[in-house]
Image: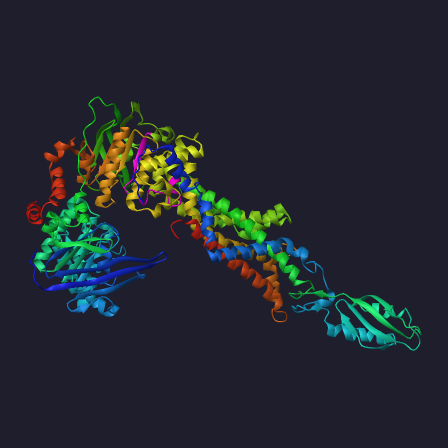
Amino acid sequence: MNARSDDPVLTVRGLEVAFETNDGTIEAVRGIDLDVHRGETVAIVGESGSGKSQSMMAAMGLLASNGRARGKAVYRGRDLVGMRERDLNRIRGDKITMIFQEPMTSLDPLYRVGRQLAEPMLHHRGLSRRAAREKAIALLDRVGIPDPQRRIDAYPHELSGGQRQRVMIAMALANDPDLLIADEPTTALDVTVQAQILTLLADLQRERGMAIVFITHDLGIVRRFASRVYVMRRGEVVESGDTRTVFEAPRHPYTRMLIDAEPAGEKAPPPADAPMALSGERVRVSFDIGGGLLKGPPVVLKAVDDVTLRLRKGQTIGVVGESGSGKSTLGRALLRLLSSEGRIVFMGRDISAADKAAMRPLRKELQLVFQDPFGSLSPRMTIGQIVTEGLLVHEPGLSGQERERRAVEALREVGLDPAMRNRYPHEFSGGQRQRIAIARAVILKPHVVVLDEPTSALDRSVQKQIVELLRDIQSRYGMAYLFISHDLAVVRAMSDYVVVMKTGRVVEEGPTGAIFERPASDYTKSLMHAAFALTDFHDEARRVAQGG
Amino acid sequence: MQMRLDPAADSDDLARSIADAGPSRSLWQDAWLRLRRNKAAVASGLVLAFFALVAIFGPALAPNPYDRVFPQYVRVPASLEAYPRADSIVPEFESVLARARVEVGDISLDGGTISAPIVSGSGIDPRFTRFVERSNLFTNARIVDISADETRATMVADVARTYFFFGTDANGRDLFARTMIGVRISLAIGLLASLTALVIGVAYGAVAGFLGGRIDGVMMRFVDILYSLPFIFFVILLVVFFGGNFVLMFLAVGAIEWLDMARIVRGQTISLKRQEFVQAAEALGVKPGGIVRRHIVPNTLGPVVVYLTLLVPKVILLESFLSFLGLGVQEPLTSLGVLISEGAANMQGATWMLVFPAITLIVILFALNFLGDGLRDALDPRDR
């Protein structure tokens, strides 16, 4: 896959992208140079807002209406910047194609997969419908969709996230492109699926000799997958070169910071005599997902099936699993936000039968931090109001001034400037919002906090800060965490005990060190493989991925 | 923007950062600050304030009362000059004096008084004034400056002159005064009914949407039942109950108009309550009432405000329809809707009867819409 030749496919020189906004001009890309040769994989790495996506969008003529591009992006002797829409359309979707991050939204939900796949072939190749369909089936087969004859007539919602991304790849390959631009194609996927997609892309590249530009914030992928890498920061390329060289001897401090941003460290288990904070015995949660009156027998989904978990004061239990494994449901059931069967005991008190009203006073002690820092903060409340809402409920006697003081304290504690508490959530970055969500939980000094993927929506370096913050708060107040995540690296750094879940059941559990060093079940092994094989060097990792 | 601070910072520092941020502001204070920056909305607000003042004080300050009939000025066009016009007063004065068989000199018209030197060979008779007063244009006729030989004098009379800036209607009533009273009635009705609809609709919709399930079903079926009842039947019932009291009556109209509002708010609420911030509030132990008040209702305000600005004109027009049926405001009281429908009927001969009330209504509605837009933007902190 590193068949580098001196045959340039895309040459970018002095590319600048600016957006006109109400607050003035924002320079997203400030003059970058970039070369992509035939058959090579180039990665563009950077954190959100670094301009890595916008630079490629500009080359494809896909900027938002307020965006302006300057400079050159030459594809086979023709400058794409400023090219007429009609000429551009002959190239994009045909010779240069793109796949995007969100497989859920990049397929049109109203059309069958086959029709969307056939579209570029009908348009660019002038194939007949029948021929296009034949070719679409072959493509689906190639990208590893099982039973393509049947799947071609499926609607997008009938496919899983990984399958949708495969369909997107098939679409991008339909016309044998020279260049495939992959914009965070695996970020929204589970680790095991991520590994499969990456392997698929690598195989396809070898087969067809196309060039791939891989836009990502995940250094693990870059290290494994790309031959050359460009590191972007604030619209500029700060470092570029051979992947191995850049990783082994990063010259720019920013690159070094990115490489060091992998969460590190480990958590010591709590003392053996630490009191039990929250325990669930044989917890079951099931949802009715079909059937019922006149529709046949009820169909029940067992989201959590017979899970037992004991969380002690000062302990962090990591719950690991792919999406759909029931780990979030388990967290909510333990907090009695969902009704469940089984026995749940909080600080020696059986709360399995407590109703909403009975739980209300206990909510002070049992807090929850959500994955999505954008959705979990009310958009029309100021940060101050959001953080102090819990006080309003649980300590109604506090004066306004006292609440204010507590808000300032809590914001300081999570590393935010308390002077910003009159602002609204949308003014903050993802990491800052997650800090706000954490402040909302810790202001009540709870005993137990369920952290539901608190770092998944964040950049690596921000993830690291949040992990440190959470550890810091835990050591100060000795609270117990239930840390739910699909990101094994973060779980390893955060927790002293790990529970691996699959389809609602616990497959394996044990102290963190033991699980990570000697995984017993096949499922855990495959998770480990997918997650940590990614951080190895590409040649070695590829062998492993192909073997497994 | 991030600061790594020692959590145990001393209290001075704490006090300073509290002072830095100023006191906490509520959503409405914040919205007000943002609204003030929106020029169109501020201008609209001023226009509406002007009309509100007109509605309150205008009728009292107008040259004529809104219900006085001027039989001699039926459907006279709008004019900045006073009625009767000079070119109709002077010949009339001439002719009445001719009837008194006196010679008339130069007639001069000065504001509300008219005067002319008169010469009579048979001597000036004080009864000459009766001839003048017989005409209904003149009052208070008197003879002054009688010369020594009693053959020359000056006849002076007051002319009742009045202004009809917007002309008069088919009954000879001052349209200016009537437009102002119409603004008063229409604004009052529009705001009363819309606010009633707002309060009931938002509360009902938010509660139904938030509680969901069976309660939602029952509450919404009740709304469906109200939808299916004929509106006019309702209004007739209301008129029977409340009689001629139009304030109560339009509170009642508002109490019917809330149905759409409840639907809109319920729909919004259902999508909002699945949002994570509502779950987060539940996880904090916030009671359902608090969630509805702090999280649901503020987030429905955008569409609600827009719908409200559509509702006000709707109610104003609805009122003219009811008045047309004889169920709304009763003569001689009037409203903009009534004036416009009268104007439309007289459009061919008397355009002013349509133009002035219509322009007034248009200006009010424009202002309401701009203000509504401005409010929606101001209430959405994301959109600056």
State which region is magenta.
A365-385
Q: How many discs appear?
A: 0
Relative vertical location of residue A114 with respect to residue A308 in this rendering, above or below:
below
Q: Position of residue A182 (x, y in %)?
A: 18, 55
Instruction: Based on the picture, tell me whether residue A293 belongs to the magenta stretch.
Output: no
Q: Magenta stretch: dominant SS?
A: loop
Quarter where residue A30 is shown? bottom left
Quarter where residue B138 is shown? bottom right
At x 7%, y 59%, the residue is A4
Relative vertical location of residue B10 with respect to residue B277 in this rendering, above or below:
above
Instruction: Based on the picture, tell me whether residue A381 belongs to the magenta stretch.
Output: yes
Q: Is residue A21 left or right of residue A100?
A: right
Q: Position of residue A507 (x, y in %)?
A: 16, 34
At x 17%, y 50%, the residue is A252
At x 14%, y 40%, the residue is A527
Q: Position of residue A301 (x, y in %)?
A: 24, 38
Q: Quadrant of the N terminus of chain B?
A: top left
Q: Is residue A229 visible?
A: no
Q: Is residue A395 visible?
A: yes
Quarter where residue A417 is shown? top left
Of B268 and A88, the residue lying toward us:
A88
Of A79 and B64, the residue lying toward us:
A79
